[in-house]
Structure formats: C-alpha cells, structure tokens
Amino acid sequence: MALDPEFLQYRHRGRGMDHDRYQWSRLHQREKVSWPGGARLALWINVCVQFFPLNQRGAPFAAPSGMTMPYPDLRHFSLRDYGNRVGIFRLLDAFDRYKVKPSFAVNGAMVERTPGLISTLRERGDEIVAHGWHMDCLHHGGLAAGEESDLIGRTLDSLRAATGQAVTGWLSPARNESPITPDLLAEQGVQWFADWVNDDMPYRFHTRAGDLWAMPLSNELEDRFILMQNLHSEESWATQVCDACDFLLKEAATGGGRILALNLHPWLLGQPHRIGRLEQALDYITSRSGVWAAAPGEILAACVNSDRSELSLD
C-alpha cells in the first residue's frame, strides 16, 4: 500500500537540521575564537549544588542520582546531604589551591535549605548558574506553559535575591526540557543554557524571545556519568580528563580556542577517596601552557568579543 503523499511533506526537509533552533555547522569550518592572553584552552569547571527530596515523585521520571530505594531512602538522601555539608568544601579548597574559577549550578530550593552554604558561595563571588527549583522539579512536555514559567521565575528570583548576581545562565535538572523551555528562559532574562551537549563551542540558539547561547558543558566528562553510569574508576576519570585536555590543546593550535568543561558533584568527588583524583587532574591541567581558567560568563563574553564581531553558526 502506497504512502499518502502528505507523509513526505515536512517543512524542515533539506540539508541541515530538522528544526529551526540553530543552523547546522561543522566545528572545523567556523571562524577561530581567540581567548585572552593568547590562551588556547578555556577551563570551565561547574559544580552542581542540588537538593533531592526524600519523598521524590519521579515525574515524569526520576532524575539521575535521585532516590532509588523504597521510602524513606535515607542512604541516598543523606549522601547527597554529605556533598553539600562536607564534600563541597574539599572541592573549594582544591579550586583555590590551583587558582581555578568554578561556577556553581544551584537549585533554587538550596537558598532556603542551606543559607550558610549560599552565603559562602556569595562571598566567594563565583558565578551562580540557575539549576531549576530542585532535582524533582523536572522540565518536560507535560508541564503547562504557565506552570513551567512560574517554576523558572521562582528559581531565578530566589537565586538572584540571595546572591546579588544577575544569574543569566541555566542548567535544567537532569538536563531535561520541555519543547518551550528555551523560550521561557529567554523571556526571563537568561542569556545562556547548558542543556544541549551537541558541540564543543558556544552557538546561537533561536527562541521566540530572541537568541540564547548554548554552552558546551560536557556530559561525557561528567564525574557522575563516568563513575556511576559507565562504572569507570576514579583513576580512569582523571585520565580521561587529562587526555581531553591534551587533545583540545593540540586541536586549538590550528583550530582556534577550545573549551574543556567539567561538570562535578560534591557528593561524588568530595569523598576522601576521590578528591585526590580531582587534585591530580587540576594539577595536570593548570601546569599546561595556554590554559585559561574562567567562569562560563567570561568564556562566552570572550567568545562573542573575539576577533570576529559576532559568533554564529549561520
């Protein structure tokens, strides 16, 4: 039986992407980006500061690293709490020792739950990234537009008031979105987001409220992904990070500036048997010539204000 002709009528059919969010482009064909001071590699370290409710609903799915045992799953709940009370301070010490500038992706609910930690982050002055309300408030197609908009606004309002920062970056819980999440983010003053992992450099992402920038926060080098999902060792994680550093530095020599982005979780790498591997990786990366450690906002600004007047995938 022949297909109905309408089956083949698709407005996005043609060369490139099957949507109009961004233009298709090969990395090596784009104009080269220059980092400050002639650096070849921008180091972006992002730390997730999260709250996983004990009575997790898991709608429409349970966020990775959430509760997995019958209620009350105190083992996993208390381990996440360990990260925010103990592990994160080991990470802060390591960052300061190696003079790197992390960003912190913070759930809005953390402002109410851990005011002391939020005060510490505010005093440090590191860039705060909005990370949704908490890890059981997922953004997905089943949310009404008004409900999702309110959730985004509540998160941004809470973090902006508590930190005194503009908070223009966003990372969705579980990196999950509804079809209109980027539009709602742009409408509320967000300038960049890190949910999409389809590139190594920033690119313009079109929304009904103007363009956002998609920032490349690697999922492949994330501690949780390598240690918990791929079940690799801590030594393997450090090796993979250092390998990526070496390759990107080499690629940048001819292709222009590159970004090494590491997404970390305090309850994982903040453990006494793992923190040494983070220190090992930081020692290696910061010892290499041509590495610039910077916050995501600084990296994006340098990208946009590079030798060309505007970065675009068009």
Image (cartoon, helix red, strand yellow):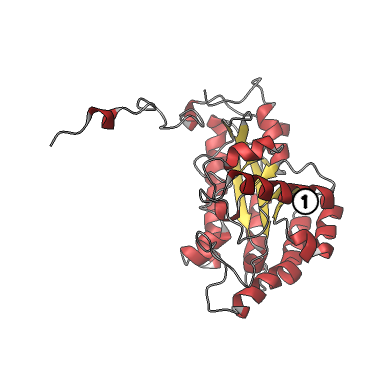
Residue 1 can be seen, yes or no: yes
* Residue located at (52% from left, 64% from top): 62
**Position above or below: 9 against 287:** above
- Label total for image: 1
Q: Please provide percent x and percent y for residue 141.
A: 51, 48
Residue 208 occupies quadrant: top right
**Position above or below: 167 against 282:** above
Q: Residue furthest top?
A: 309
**Position above or below: 8 against 298:** above
Residue 38 can be seen, yes or no: no
Q: Please provide percent x and percent y for residue 117.
A: 80, 63
* Residue located at (80% from left, 47% from top): 160
The reply, left or right, for residue 298 in relation to residue 268 is right
Mark 1 neighbour class, 10 Å CA radius: few under 14, some 14 to 19, many 20 or more: many
Q: Secondary structure at mark 1?
A: helix
- Which of 183/119 is in front? 183
Which quadrant is home to the N terminus? top left
* Residue located at (53% from left, 61% from top): 59
Q: Please provide percent x and percent y for residue 110.
A: 74, 61
**Position above or below: 255 against 133:** above
Task: Inspect the image, locate mark 1, and give the three-letter code of the amino acid beneath it.
Answer: Leu
Q: Which residue is mark 1?
A: 159
* Residue located at (53% from left, 43% from top): 196
Residue 149 occupies quadrant: top right
- Which of 250/14 is in front? 14
